[in-house]
Image: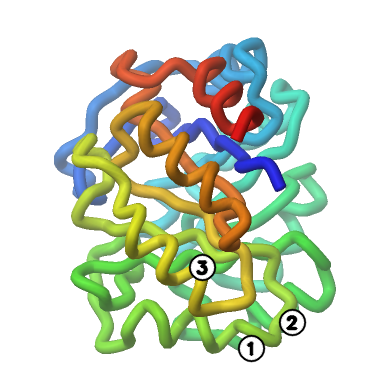
């Protein structure tokens, strides 16, 4: 199994941004044309793209829908989308728009029946976001922290048929501190669902280590700020993942 490298496009006000620790007041703008950014990633070899509607995550519904649709039209590969997807209409609408997989976080905690039904009706299409602050699940754009341990949320969907778990250590996201590889691998070993690593990837070293853990259930890794800041070359990351 080859590790999937997902370059990330986070949307705020229609622009490409990265946040520090999920804080909307700590946003760095990297561009105002998400579709052009998606094409640049494709030209570097990316076949998968991860997108987040940050405004939508806080609002609870799509806010940057037009920008997302432009990206889906422009990008020749698979688009994975998260942010504010909390009802059946949104799920159906995004699949009809051509999104390949949907990432659901808040609703996974608050309305697990919705996620189970979607995973059943759209096989391979639903990813559950396990966003953790000091081990506890964070929701609503990471603004709320629950009393549910991340591992417990993950285990609730063991038999649901979800495609993957997207694990983010919120305290590292957007800070280039390094991905929490150990916690990610521990989660992958604890559940039968493939796990995608996210949060704080700082360079090629983490891509290499995560690729070696593909056999332990690590399906992919999401990287954003390291790409935009030039600390990680996407073509090189894809090559390392393929070689491992």
The residue carrying mark 1 is 113
Q: Secondary structure at mark 2?
A: helix
The residue carrying mark 2 is 117
Do labels 1 and 2 touch, CB within 8 Å? yes
Q: Quadrant of the C terminus?
A: top right
Is residue 66 visible to the viewer in this orientation of the structure? no
Q: Secondary structure at mark 3?
A: helix
On residue 188, the disc is 3
Q: Give the residue displayed 69% in from the left and 53% down from the top.
A: 101
Q: Position of residue 230 (x, y in %)?
A: 33, 14
Q: Is residue 151 left or right of residue 41?
A: left
Viewer-closest of 210 and 20: 210
Viewer-closest of 196 and 123: 196
Do labels 2 and 3 touch, CB within 8 Å? no
Q: Is residue 76 left or right of residue 48?
A: right
Dot 2: few (<14), some (14–19), or many (≥20) neighbours within 10 Å? few
Q: CA distance from mark 2 to mark 3?
A: 23 Å
């Amino acid at each position: 199994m080859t590790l999937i490298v997902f370059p990330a496009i986070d949307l705020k006000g229609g622009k490409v941004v990265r946040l520090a620790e999920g804080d909307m007041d700590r946003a760095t703008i990297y561009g105002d044309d998400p579709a052009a950014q998606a094409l640049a990633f494709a030209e570097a070899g990316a076949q998968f793209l991860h997108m987040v509607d940050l405004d939508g995550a806080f609002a609870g519904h799509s806010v940057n829908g037009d920008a997302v649709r432009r990206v889906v039209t422009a990008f020749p590969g698979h688009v994975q989308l998260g942010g504010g997807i909390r009802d059946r209409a949104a799920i159906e609408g995004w699949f009809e728009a051509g999104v390949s997989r949907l990432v659901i976080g808040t609703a996974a905690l608050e309305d697990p029946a919705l996620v189970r039904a979607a995973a059943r009706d759209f096989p391979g299409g639903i990813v559950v976001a396990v966003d953790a602050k000091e081990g506890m699940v964070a929701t609503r754009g990471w603004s709320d922290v629950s009393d549910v341990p991340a591992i417990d949320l993950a285990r609730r969907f063991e038999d649901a048929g979800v495609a993957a778990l997207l694990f983010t250590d919120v305290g590292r996201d957007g800070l280039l501190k390094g991905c929490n590889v150990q916690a990610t691998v521990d989660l992958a070993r604890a559940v039968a669902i493939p796990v995608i690593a996210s949060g704080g990837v700082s360079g090629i070293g983490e891509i290499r280590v995560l690729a070696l853990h593909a056999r332990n259930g690590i399906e992919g890794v999401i990287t954003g700020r390291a790409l935009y800041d030039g600390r990680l070359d996407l073509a090189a990351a894809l090559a390392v993942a393929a070689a491992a």
